[in-house]
Image: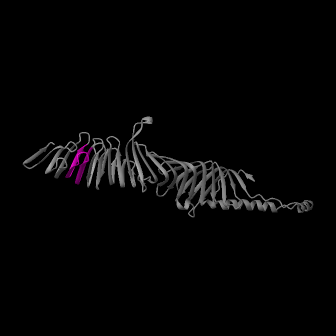
Amino acid sequence: MTRDPHRQFSRPLGAIVLGIALSVGIAACTKKPPESQKADGDRSAAPKVETNLTFNDITLEQVDEQGKLVWVVKGKQATYSSDRQLAALKKPQGELYQDGKLVFKIEAEQGEIHQNGEKILLKDKVVATDIQDNAVVRGDTLEWLPKKDTLTVRGNLQGTHEEADVTAQEARLFGKKRRMELLGEVIMRAKESSLQIASDSMIWEMEQKLAISDKPVQIDRYEGEGDAEKVTDRATADRAQVQLDTQVATLQQNAQLALVDPPVQVASNELIWDLPAERLTSNVPVRVVHNEQKVTLSGNNGWIDLAAEVFQLNDGIEAISQTNQAQLIANQLTWNIPTQEFVAEGDVTYRQVDPPLSVNGPRAEGQLQEQTFSISGGRVTTEIVP
């Protein structure tokens, strides 16, 4: 049975279908067949009862107990199942509401409405638009659960937003919380800078403009465009969060930042990476390794100017040169990577193996790798040139 009502239904799915079914049943009972036909009918098989109802260009909607809209779905065609618990739609387009407020728009090639609108499924060329945050998510399938305020998009997922683009296997959007949870091979690429975040799962707090991952995460910074694009810095950690509007990343637990040029690695249990300022800060113990110069620095806290390639470490400083087995201990150390010069202050102690030497003083400056430096303090200044 096919009908073209061209009108909007405001009752629940089950009530709509039930009303149509009753009308068909009453019409069937108002006319009795002639006796001859009845006799023929007795000899033939029982007549088939049409169990599916089909409508063209239909609009369905669901309201809650307070009369507020829950969803509105339009379709080129809708076919109801025999138990009236499912409506299959072609070319569905819908609007989804929370507390009477429009939160999502959805569309696809095919769709289904289940159990009086308690679940909506879409598939094939799915597009979901987050109205509050102007984010668009595309994928293979979509599931909307109004009572749980959860819209889930799965398969070949691509998301676009003014702050970042994302790809993943699955996304869960929560209208009231203004949150997007991303799962499976998640990659987020910021638009305002060449920053990329990769992890197995990520939470995107849309209103706070914050990306959070409690799984192992990798953050890359790129330079160049197209074929000339290359990674200049790479950070990893067991968990991280990135403030997308300010481009500040906080990495925690086994956090590491690897610089390509110069080849330096920074490790700590917390690293704060300010990408626009090109500054790395740690308020907990931190270790710096220069692979080419074979120098290792450590301190209880410090910062790094990535543009100037200058490090400053504070409290409990230890610098070790593997080349000449030299050690420097101080309360504060500033190290310039391009010139390989350092300035150490506060209870400075220098030791070397060959020739054996140990010198103390309040301040030292020079080049640790070359074993050329001066120690000064008070009235005494000592220079040592091996």
Q: How many marks?
A: 0
Give the residue displayed 25% in from the left and 45% down from the top: 323
Residue 161 in magenta stretch? no
Whether residue 296 sits left or right of residue 55 in the image: it is left
Q: Nearer the viewer, residue 33 or 175?
A: 175
Place of residue 321 in the rendered image (x, y in percent of width and height, measured from the top left): 24, 47
Whether residue 19 sits left or right of residue 156 in the image: it is right
Q: Residue farthest to the bottom? A: 65
Looking at the rendering, which quadrant does residue 28 occupy?
Answer: bottom right
Whether residue 5 sits left or right of residue 172 in the image: it is right
Q: Nearer the viewer, residue 340 or 384?
A: 384
Residue 334 in magenta stretch? yes
Place of residue 256 in the rendered image (x, y in percent of width and height, measured from the top left): 35, 50
Whether residue 78 sits left or right of residue 349 in the image: it is right
Give the residue displayed 66% in from the left and 56% down from the top: 87
| Residue 209 shows in the view | no
| Residue 14 shows in the view | yes
* Placement of the C terminus among the 4 image quadrants: top left
The scheme the figure's colours follow is one colour
Above or below residue 35? Residue 321 is above
SS assignment for the magenta stretch, majority: strand
Give the residue displayed 56% in from the left and 63% down from the top: 66
Place of residue 285 in the rendered image (x, y in percent of width and height, measured from the top left): 28, 55
Q: Nearer the viewer, residue 60 or 212?
A: 212
Place of residue 275 in the rendered image (x, y in percent of width and height, measured from the top left): 35, 45
**Magenta residues, as a range?**
310-336
Q: Residue farthest to the left? A: 379
Above or below residue 138? Residue 118 is below
